[in-house]
Amino acid sequence: TRKIIIDTDPGQDDAVAILLALASPEEVEVLGITAVAGNVPLPLTQRNARIVCELAGRKDIPVFAGCDAPLHRKLVTAEHVHGKTGLDGPQLPDPTMPLQDRHGVDFIIETLRSHAPGTVTLCPLGPLTNIATAFRRAPDIVDRVQQIVLMGGAYFEVGNITPAAEFNIYVDPQAADIVFKSGAEITVMPLDLTHKALTTADRVEAFRAMGTHVGKMVAEWTDFFERFDKEKYGSEGAPLHDPCVIAYLIRPNLFAGRFVNVEIETGSELTLGMTVADWWGVTDRAPNATFMGSVDAAGFFDLLTDRIARL
Ligand code: BDR
Ligand code: CA
């Protein structure tokens, strides 16, 4: 069982990722969830994280609020994709489980220090502000991280928030730069990959057909979340970005990629937040991340429906 910390800005796809993790206790143990400002501001993302835990019947999962703004820039949000609450779609009750008192960054630092080195994996599903802040404040924890598996970046098909950049990296490029230069073992699920795992009508129907409350919620979230991609890209469904991170921890063989050098653009306004991946090895810059390029989409959705049905 992998011990993980989910760092997140829910977000319908973040919500499905959290559910997938909570439905898979044999493979992953969720030590805690740290919320970050991203899709919507922090008061909403920490609240949404608690709503999702409660939906899964897991009020025992500690949820922490982390950073409320990127390191050096003003927060850019994505209500145009996720709706005003960040979790628009079905009506869900207000959470009753408490928010933890400790700051999310302190939780990340203390958890890495109190566990044996190489036994805690970080799963960032939003901007990398919390992770970078933890690494800056406590450089000793970097070597203790087992792996960072994150959703972010884009290279071949490039951006969804600017022509060059993916949302999570664009919101806090300086944080991303710190994380990618940290020396930690990093696996990246970029847009190029997540756009290969689209929620077709049949796949959404499979969630609804479960006949469970959670299945219905997932179907309604996906329906809401799909509008954006269907209108924007004319695609038959939407990519379920963030669940790819958790699916990778459960079934790594569903994914394939390359260990390459990835640099983050932090200077140019035009291409800010671009993840420049040296896919063809045309530089002598040392590889620092495994950039995933392909996914067995049918296998991914089989896994997702199998697990969501357990909740
Ligand atoms: C990423 O941005 C957010 O809108 C999603 O939750 C996902 O983490 C995709 O670019
Ligand atoms: Ca997210």
Image (cartoon, rainbow, N blue to C red):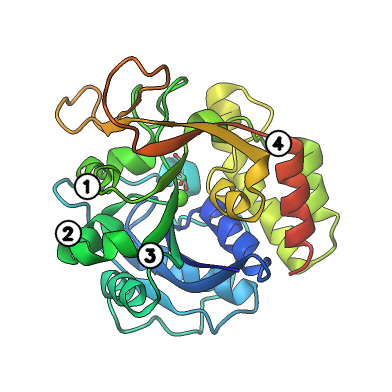
Q: Position of residue 217 (x, y in %)?
A: 68, 60
Instruction: Report whether residue 259 is seen.
Output: yes
Q: Secondary structure at mark 2?
A: helix
Instruction: Report whether residue 68 is seen.
Output: no
Identified at 73% across, 69% down, the residue is 311
Q: Which residue is mark 2?
A: 136
Task: Locate residue 274: give its quadrant.
Answer: top left
Is 6 displayed left or right of 141 in the figure? Answer: right
Discs 3/1, front? 1
Q: Is 285 above or below relative to 130?
A: above
Identified at 35% across, 80% down, the residue is 114
Is 52 displayed left or right of 267 in the figure? Answer: right
Discs 2/3, front? 2
Task: Locate residue 296: give its quadrant.
Answer: top right
Tell whether label 1 touches label 2 (CB within 8 Å).
yes
Q: Residues within 10 Å of mark 3 (few under 14, many from 20)?
A: many
Q: Which residue is mark 3?
A: 35
Q: Which residue is mark 1?
A: 178
